[in-house]
Image (spheres, rainbow, N blue to C red):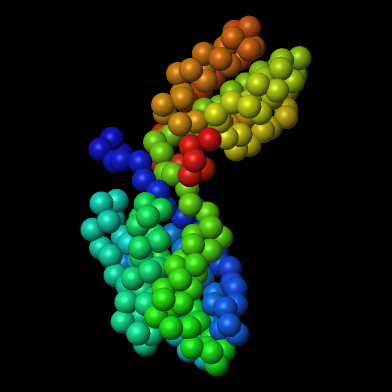
């Protein structure tokens, strides 16, 4: 993990749909660590929508975007797969796949209309799946007594931290996830807010998802 870089990907599988001139478009997005996972996702969507007119797709695999594939799946060349992957590249996502399914509604959209429709399909797929920034992070266990917990909880609500779990026993123990870049300042603030009474214990490092905007 020491040599790994921060990167954008999708939080989870998601989908959204819209209609343009009676054609129904469904955009699917999914995180995929390998090309095999991307192809399996594509196969699953194709099977789900085997009666669809087109299942166009794109995927980008590798933190350096080393593998990039796309397909128009019968649409005019350059009107489907390319717009899908261009939206993905513009968002900067990797290790994910997008499939845009189309049920033809009887009205021709033209080349420009298709490009716009499939770009929109890619956008709604990414938004539905949730673009996240995977950053080097640290997990900490923080223990305080009940008289201090309210103060700490109030502080954590606005701190750059994710509260993963809170356990109420003889004392309060919460599990926190924080970006490595915020770790030192967060621990210092916890010490200040609790007047040095908080017990903190590091619980490992990992790459964790954070909002795309860095908040």
In the displayed orientation, state which residue is furthest to the top: 195
Seen at 68% across and 32% down, the residue is: 167
Quarter-of-image position of residue 114: bottom left
- Position of residue 37 measured from the top left corner of the image (x, y, whole percent): 37, 67
Give the vertical position of 77 relative to 91 (above or below). below
Seen at 39% across and 36% down, the residue is: 136
Q: Looking at this view, is 111 or 91 the one in front?
A: 111
**157 left or right, relative to 50:** right
Q: Looking at this view, is 138 or 119 the one in front?
A: 119
Quarter-of-image position of residue 162: top right
- Position of residue 175 measured from the top left corner of the image (x, y, whole percent): 58, 32
- Position of residue 161 measured from the top left corner of the image (x, y, whole percent): 56, 31
Give the vertical position of 167 relative to 133 (above or below). above
Give the vertical position of 38 relative to 6 (above or below). below
Seen at 28% across and 65% down, the residue is: 68
Q: How many marks?
A: 0
Q: Is residue 104 in sight in this rendering?
A: yes
**154 left or right, relative to 124:** right
- Position of residue 146 measured from the top left corner of the image (x, y, whole percent): 75, 19
Image quadrant where one finds the N terminus: top left
**3 left or right, relative to 196:** left
Give the vertical position of 73 relative to 85 (above or below). below
Seen at 36% across and 65% down, the residue is: 85
Q: Is residue 95 in sight in this rendering?
A: no
């Amino acid at each position: 993990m020491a040599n790994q870089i921060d990167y954008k990907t999708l939080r989870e599988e998601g989908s959204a749909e819209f209609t343009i001139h009676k054609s129904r478009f469904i955009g699917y997005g999914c995180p995929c660590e390998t090309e095999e996972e991307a192809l399996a996702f594509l196969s699953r969507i194709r099977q789900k929508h085997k009666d669809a007119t087109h299942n166009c797709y794109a995927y980008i695999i590798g933190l350096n975007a080393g593998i990039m594939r796309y397909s128009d799946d019968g649409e005019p060349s350059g009107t489907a797969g390319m717009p899908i992957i261009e939206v993905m590249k513009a968002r900067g996502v990797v290790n994910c796949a997008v499939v845009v399914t189309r049920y033809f509604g009887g009205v021709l959209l033209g080349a420009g209309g298709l490009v716009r429709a499939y770009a929109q399909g890619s956008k709604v797929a990414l938004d539905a799946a949730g673009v996240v920034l995977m950053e080097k992070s640290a997990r900490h266990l923080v223990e305080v007594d009940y008289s201090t917990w309210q103060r700490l909880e109030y502080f954590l609500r606005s701190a750059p931290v994710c509260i993963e779990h809170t356990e109420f026993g003889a004392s309060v123990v919460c599990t926190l996830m924080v970006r490595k870049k915020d770790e030192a300042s967060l621990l210092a603030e916890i010490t200040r807010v609790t007047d040095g009474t908080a017990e903190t214990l590091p619980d490992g490092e990992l790459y964790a998802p954070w909002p795309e905007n860095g908040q």
